[in-house]
Image (cartoon, helix red, strand yellow):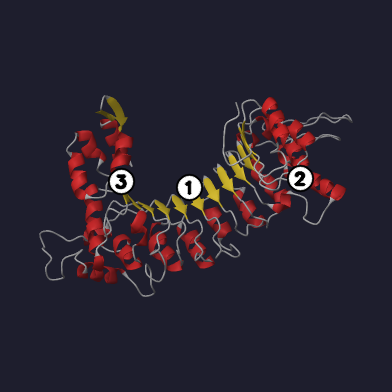
């Protein structure tokens, strides 16, 4: 990254048809060129193009034909080495690369020495059967590379020119890995991720159905500097036994976390409340934690985006109806927003005891004001769980003055009168999602447009800004 930044400062832009093009844009465009002749011709344009063709992420698509017997893997490895690529992104037909070929490219001696970022989403070969079978080791990968022509034979190595094995020993650790929508299992986690655990910063494993509790435990023991973690809808995590230790090990560095669809409990939410650097959190469809524990999430000092959609514990119980449902929804809304509620004036002679850094209010008839971190929240998702009481109390809390994005999709039980009045108090609101809600009618939209003239009202699939 430092070398790329230095090149960007040395070659800030280049002129194309009288227009200055930034160095980063040229580098991104050339990353999609995956055949050597075209890259050689591009490097002859100017010095900026030649430097932009080196390093960066190599996006390998269908143009690079993977020949039988793995000859394409050796060619791809040579291309990445010649380009000094720091990242690899599989596109098109290359996503169907077999597991043994991926193993020889990423774990064997064919791996480029500078490779630190992998975008392997939807890669069919990333599974325990092909990529990390039981008993497979690096010697097998080296023997396979020699058979396919990636390395010289054992007796043909020149002592003056060492083979690629030193590069394999001194390879860069992985920092960014995206293996979403793959069959990544325990063997792949131990072979690919655990050796670079202390260097991993970004890890995206969304919809990895083969990811088990043992793999999560291995990640908890290896990773200690994660900044972005995505585990949404990993159906193999039936209890998330090792999730709390994983959060504790990365509490100081974790910034974005997606646990949607996982069995998150009160213990996990308590561990999330200790992640003070967290800025984005998604708990869509998580129903295993209580409302009182979830209220602690609103006090995170740097949290700007929170998704609690489909969390049924925020709304009234399914079986409740009429006045009972309204009362229970109001109680849950009060508990959820208790820590960010505005202080109310005392009605019985209560006195405020204030010290340095103390924001509590003491006295009879006075509400508690613990708005630590509330001013930083900008986006809140309440898909199918918002109620009239929750919207009303949200507008009266400290979040009402800072909230810019609100998701109310699927909330079909909202009343037009109370909700329209409460939403009109959210003056900072810029985006309001109303698809499939009771506020998506023409009359309600007209009233909202008059109350919030600068807000983008999204009531249908065609998203058009409100003018």
Q: Quadrant of residue 347?
A: top right
Residue placed furthest toward the right = 348
Residue corresponding to mark 1 = 227
Residue corresponding to mark 3 = 32
In this rendering, the label closer to the viewer, 1 or 3:
3
Q: Quadrant of residue 420?
A: top right
CB under 8 Å between callouts 2 and 3? no
* Identity of the residue drawn at 21% across and 39% down: 50
- Earlier-in-chain disc, 2 versus 3: 3
Identify which residue, 111 or 43, lies in the foreground: 43
Can you say whether 382 is above or below 285 in the image? above
* Quadrant of the image containing the C terminus: top right
CB under 8 Å between callouts 1 and 3? no
Q: Quadrant of residue 153?
A: bottom left
x, y percent for residue 118: 37, 53
| Other residues around mark 3 within 10 Å, as few (<14) / some (14–19) / many (≥20) | some
Can you say whether 73 is above or below 33 in the image? below
SS at mark 3 in the image: loop
x, y percent for residue 328: 81, 49
Q: CA distance from mark 1 to mark 3?
A: 27 Å
In the visual, does 3 lie left or right of 403?
left
**The disc label shown at residue 413, or none:** 2
| Other residues around mark 1 within 10 Å, as few (<14) / some (14–19) / many (≥20) | some
């Amino acid at each position: 990254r430092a070398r790329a930044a230095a090149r960007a400062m040395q070659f800030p832009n280049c002129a194309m048809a009288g227009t200055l093009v930034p160095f980063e844009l040229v580098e991104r465009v050339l990353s999609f060129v995956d055949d050597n002749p075209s890259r050689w011709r591009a490097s002859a344009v100017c010095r900026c193009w030649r430097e932009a063709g080196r390093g960066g992420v190599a996006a390998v698509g269908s143009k690079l034909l993977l020949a039988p017997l793995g000859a394409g893997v050796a060619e791809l490895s040579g291309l990445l080495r010649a380009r000094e690529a720091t990242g690899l992104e599989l596109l098109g037909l290359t996503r169907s690369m077999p597991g043994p070929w991926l193993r020889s490219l990423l774990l064997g001696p064919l791996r480029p020495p500078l490779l630190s970022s992998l975008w392997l989403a939807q890669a069919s070969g990333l599974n325990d059967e092909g990529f990390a079978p039981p008993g497979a080791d690096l010697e097998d990968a080296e023997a396979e590379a020699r058979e396919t022509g990636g390395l010289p034979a054992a007796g043909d190595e020149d002592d003056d020119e060492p083979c690629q094995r030193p590069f394999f020993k001194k390879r860069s650790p992985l920092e960014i890995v995206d293996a979403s929508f793959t069959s990544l299992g325990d063997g792949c986690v131990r072979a690919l991720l655990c050796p670079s655990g202390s260097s991993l910063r970004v890890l995206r494993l969304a919809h990895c159905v083969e990811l088990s509790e043992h793999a999560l435990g291995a990640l908890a023991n290896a990773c200690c500097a994660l900044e972005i973690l995505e585990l949404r809808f990993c159906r193999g995590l039936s209890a998330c036994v090792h999730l709390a230790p994983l959060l504790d090990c990365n509490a100081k560095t974790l910034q974005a976390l997606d646990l949607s669809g996982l069995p998150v409990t009160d213990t996990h939410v308590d561990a999330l409340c200790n992640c003070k650097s967290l800025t984005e959190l998604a708990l869509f469809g998580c129903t295993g934690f209580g409302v009182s524990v979830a209220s602690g999430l609103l006090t995170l000092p740097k949290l700007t985006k929170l998704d609690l959609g489909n969390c049924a514990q925020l709304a009234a119980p399914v079986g409740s109806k009429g006045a009972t449902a309204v009362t229970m929804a109001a109680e849950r809304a009060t508990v959820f927003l208790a820590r960010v509620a505005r202080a109310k004036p005392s009605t019985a002679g209560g006195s405020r005891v204030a010290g340095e850094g103390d924001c509590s209010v003491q006295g009879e008839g006075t509400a508690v004001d613990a708005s630590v971190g509330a001013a930083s929240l900008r986006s809140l998702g309440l898909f199918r769980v918002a109620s009239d009481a929750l919207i009303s109390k949200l507008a009266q809390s400290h979040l009402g003055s800072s909230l810019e994005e609100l998701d109310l999709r699927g909330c079909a039980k909202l009343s037009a009168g109370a909700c329209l009045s409460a939403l009109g108090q959210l003056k900072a609101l810029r985006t309001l999602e109303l698809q499939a809600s009771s506020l998506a009618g023409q009359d309600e939209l007209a009233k909202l447009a008059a109350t919030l003239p600068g807000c983008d009202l999204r009531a249908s699939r065609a998203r058009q800004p409100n003018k």
